Amino acid sequence: MSCSASSNLQGSNVTQNPNGPASRLVLNLESSSDFYTLDAGITNGDAIRFQPTPLGTTGTYRRSQANNNENSEVVGVVESIDTVTGNLTVVLRGIMHHSQSNFEYNEDVYGMTSGASGGNDIFFLSTGVSGGFMNLAPSEPGTIAKPILQRMSDSAGSYNYQVLNYIGYQIGGDMIAETQSTLPVGSFMKIPESSITPNGWANATTTTTPTDLDVALYPDYYTFAGLRFGYIQTLRLGGIQVTSSMINATITQNRPTGVPYTSGRIKSGSGGIANVEMSPLAIEFLQDETFPVRIVSTSGAITGTVQTASIKSVMVPRIIDNSSIAFNSLGTTVTPSFKTIIKVRDVVGVSIPKNVTVNDLNALTTLALGNTYSNVSSTLDDIISRIVILETAINGAS
């Protein structure tokens, strides 16, 4: 077979004049176009990116910033803006003249602004200034380290930087904390009935027992739901000791005139504390001794006062949805079972590589292992206790 038929690229030497037109790739952007718009904030020296419309037919040129993946994309660097037409000269690759007006000179660990080991020669896309540059790579997890400019000079002194626009990388590697779902709290969706309800979601199927969520643990859900789905109010009662016979009994608070003010069902409690289940939008019990409360149970009726009252938890609604989802597979209609879940809080997760080696691992509260061992620490304590019992049984008490 002839070598000329090979798909391999043939090597060749290419020589370019550093001061010639081949040493740079330039894009001229007119201030007005049917195919794009220019963001009003773009100035001379900015790194810019192109943000297309959802259909991709048009888009907007905006300033780049290394604060996340989307904003850190870079088309090129604006070298000049025509003062009359507003047209931009953008250097995509190669040599350019930069005014350095949007440069940040950050301090290293020694408090110096002299750059990295090579000095202030490489400039990265800025994390804090849109379109700007910084002399050191960022270190904040989630930001993007993206080298854009390299300091240089030509023989005539016309150019002072070379546009590199290297591929960036996210600081933090694979272990970046992020919200696992972008849906707002209060959103609901259907998932297969056999699936495990994801963390941060609650089962809202009509066949389930109503769930209440502690307002201290689920503040975002409390902000969303308020009292409109029902709630649990904790009352510290005066003159009443809650007994088992009062569970599920009705507790009523009356006005000074004797007219009922509000009421609820005692869900749990003991001593002088009663956790009262309130219907949706029911008026809260008042901490007011002139508004007496009365409990009627199988043991009789008893009257007292409310000394303190607070919202303990709010209810998760059971969503009424009579619609079903059917699939057609090979001419056969299949209707699988689904359950409805509602988002009750944002969950921040960390993506960890499959294999991680560390010197020390300290879990302040709980260390879980899969779905079998929810708390490895307590499991190990239990194993140690069992071993001690076995050793005592075998060797006898010491």
Image (cartoon, grey):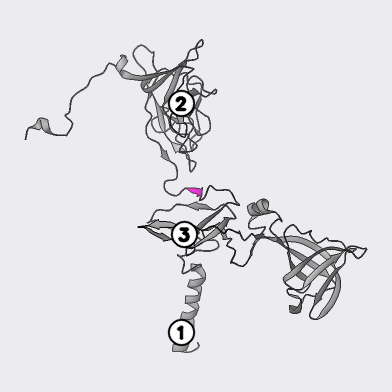
Q: Is residue 357 visible?
A: no
Query: Majority secondary structure of the magenta segment?
Result: loop
Element type at mark 2: strand
Q: Residues within 10 Å of mark 2 (few under 14, many from 20)?
A: many
Task: Tell me, for residue 390, which label it has, or none.
Answer: 1
What residue did someone put label 2 on?
47
Residue 199 vs residue 266, the one in the foreground: 266
Q: Residues within 10 Å of mark 3 (few under 14, many from 20)?
A: few
Q: Is residue 125 left or right of residue 290?
A: left
Q: Is residue 295 visible?
A: yes
Marked residue nearer the N-terminal end (2 or 3): 2
Q: In terms of image quadrants, where is residue 334?
A: bottom left
Residue type for callout 1: Leu
Q: Nearer the viewer, mark 2 or mark 1?
A: 2
User: What span is in magenta?
Assistant: 172-182
Q: Residue at x 38, y 56 (%)?
A: 354
In the picture as drawn, the residue positioned furthest to the left comes out as 1
